[in-house]
Amino acid sequence: MTIDGNRNREADAEGPAARARRVVLDQHAELRRLLTMGLAEARAVVKRHTLPHETLRPLVALIRAIFVKHLADEEALILPLLEDDLPLGPLRAQRLREEHADQRTDLDTLCSWPEDPTQDLELALRFETLGTALLHDIAHEETHLLTPEIIRDDCIVIDQFGG
């Protein structure tokens, strides 16, 4: 059997929670790469105090498109698991929805930034702030939400006693 065949069999055997974690973590890796590229470009603009290369705006738009798709995927995969995980899951789901709404708003604001070249330095500064915050949010989510203890297939409540 090929390595790909083994991987496909393993993927078929994993439950919805393991699959959700895998998909989201894979997307996080790609988002980290893009955000790091964007931050490097933005920081170069800020350091030089010059107008950015023509790459910053399209890169910000690409990051927004991929990030918004990621948020939708994450909501489709993770929210149902959280909603069914009493007692804390619904609260975690609500917090995730709120965080995603804020991230969408911030990304939309950045992508609608005026095309006026005199505003490009401000665009770079704002992207630097947002990109850093998004990387922090990704790391926090991986540490505090996307764990097998929280995103799991069973409905067992840890430390629960009785029937």
Image: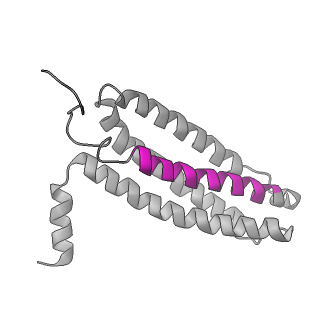
Q: Is residue 49 above or below residue 113?
A: below
Q: Residue at left 60%, top 38%? A: 102
Q: Is residue 29 above or below residue 99?
A: below
- Counting the numbered discs, the total is 0
Q: Is residue 38 left or right of residue 88?
A: right
- Residue 43, given in percent of the width and then of the height, sits at 74, 66
Residue at the far right: name it: 118
- Residue 99, given in percent of the width and then of the height, sits at 54, 38
Q: Residue at left 63%, top 41%? A: 105
Residue at the far top: name it: 163
| Magenta-drawn segment | 122-145
Q: Is residue 53 left or right of residue 137?
A: right
Q: Is residue 134 above or below residue 80?
A: below
- Residue 122, given in percent of the width and then of the height, sits at 81, 55
Q: Is residue 131 magenta?
A: yes
As rendered, which of 83 and 108 lies closer to the eye?
Answer: 83
